[in-house]
């Protein structure tokens, strides 16, 4: 099955051609990061306008690189949500246009399902599966007892982990996106500052706003005392606190659910320290299969939408030309 997949949920205009859910014939991504970095974050109106400018060019480039035509495509897949409504709308309109003009089926995909199934490019997915989803907009523990059977065991009560990184980066006057900047600084840091333990109402939920506030209060307190902040040490303290919380909740889920395969998913999966910590879980859970996706699979791309679409299609997931962008889309 050959799928043309479109992803435009945030600030990347992406199109990929995927064979049988695992073979990448092309995976074109047009990033807007240089534009949004000037504003310290993604501006939704700017993002949607840039998607409009880029979408046709990216579709054409993806087809050319895959050495294929629309006639040879079996289905059109697209991110329906969650994401920025204006950005989603551009990708969905393009996908519906392609589906209508070619007579091909349309497969609407949940953005996070794409991140989870991106792991299929590097490993055979096995069930029951636990996915630690970490991105700018999501922090979740997603459990799949069987294929395409999503259950959210825990999610963030406030900020997503990537959002927390960005906010702390602004406090430290670091560039956007904050994740890579803090990750880099933390490698140079040492134990020095102490941040509070996170408390949540539900055992598998996450919370990061308290850590963000604690960093701000620490910076303000040191400023009143005319004490210079050691950015490397503060980045280290913040990152160890955040990632420690992610690992603690992941291990709790592993201890309370039958899990054969653990996967990492989402943009923050590119964090070097997180990748080390997840890999070290092999020592505690020697029978657990663990997949850490390559960096190109972590950030938003259309190949992951194509991988998820192949599975969705087998489970009867199809859309019609009346479907619309859904920024709050739930798993289905």
Image (spheres, grey):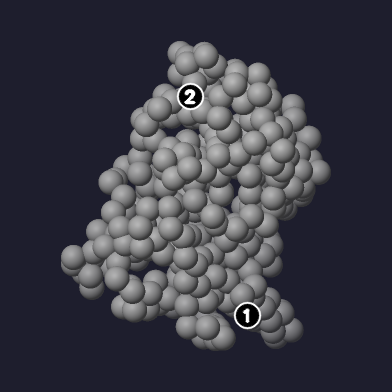
Closer to the camera in the image, 10 or 142? 142
Return the x and y of residue 54 as percentages of the image width and height.
69, 27
Q: Residue furthest left?
A: 286
Quarter of the picture containing the C terminus is bottom right
Q: Is residue 27 visible?
A: yes
Q: Is residue 216 left or right of residue 134?
A: right
Where is 329 relative to 27, above or below?
A: below
Quadrant of the rendered image containing residue 51: top right
Alpha-carbon span between mark 1 and mark 2? 48 Å
Total label count? 2
Q: Residue furthest right?
A: 45
Return the x and y of residue 104 as percentages of the image width and height.
56, 24
| Disc with the residue nearer the chain's start (1 vs 2) | 2
Mark 1 lies on residue: 210
Return the x and y of residue 196 as percentages of the image width and height.
55, 86
- The answer to the question of whether label 1 and label 2 lie on touching residues, with beta carbons closer than 8 A, is no
Residue depicted at 36% across the width and 63% down the height: 145
Return the x and y of residue 24 as percentages of the image width and height.
40, 29
Where is 221 relative to 85, above or below?
A: below
Q: Is residue 290 left or right of residue 2?
A: left
Q: Is residue 10 left or right of residue 105?
A: right
Mark 2 lies on residue: 74
Residue depicted at 37% across the width and 78% down the height: 252
Q: Which numbered mark, 1 or 2, is in the foreground of this view?
A: 2
Closer to the camera in the image, 233 or 122? 122
């Amino acid at each position: 099955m050959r799928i043309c997949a479109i992803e435009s949920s945030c600030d990347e205009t992406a199109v990929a051609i995927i064979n049988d859910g695992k073979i990448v014939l092309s995976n074109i991504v047009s990033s807007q990061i240089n534009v949004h970095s000037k504003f310290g974050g993604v501006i939704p109106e700017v993002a949607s306008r840039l998607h409009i400018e880029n979408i046709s060019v990216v579709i054409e480039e993806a087809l050319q690189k895959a050495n294929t035509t629309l006639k040879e495509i079996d289905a059109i897949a697209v991110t329906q949500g969650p994401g920025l409504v204006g950005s989603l709308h551009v990708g969905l309109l393009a996908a519906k246009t392609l589906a209508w003009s070619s007579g091909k089926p349309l497969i609407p995909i949940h953005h996070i399902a794409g991140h989870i199934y991106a792991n299929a490019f590097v490993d055979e997915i096995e069930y029951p599966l636990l996915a630690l989803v970490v991105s700018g907009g999501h922090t979740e523990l997603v459990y799949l007892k069987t294929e395409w059977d999503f259950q959210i065991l825990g999610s963030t009560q406030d900020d997503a982990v990537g959002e927390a990184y960005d906010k702390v980066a602004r406090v430290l006057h670091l560039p956007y996106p904050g994740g890579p900047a803090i990750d880099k600084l933390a490698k140079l840091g040492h134990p020095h500052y102490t941040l509070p333990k996170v408390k949540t109402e539900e055992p598998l939920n996450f919370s990061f706003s308290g850590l963000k506030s604690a960093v701000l209060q620490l910076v303000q307190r040191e400023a009143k005392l005319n004490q210079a902040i050691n950015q490397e040490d503060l980045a280290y303290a913040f990152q160890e606190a955040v990632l420690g919380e992610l690992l603690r909740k992941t291990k709790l889920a592993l201890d309370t659910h039958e899990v054969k395969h653990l996967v990492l998913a989402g943009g923050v999966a590119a964090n070097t320290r997180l990748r080390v910590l997840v890999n070290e879980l092999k020592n505690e859970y020697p029978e657990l299969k663990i997949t850490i996706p390559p960096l190109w699979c972590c950030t938003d791309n259309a190949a992951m939408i194509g991988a998820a679409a192949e599975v969705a299609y087998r489970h009867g997931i199809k859309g019609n030309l009346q479907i619309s962008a859904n920024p709050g889309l739930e798993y289905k």
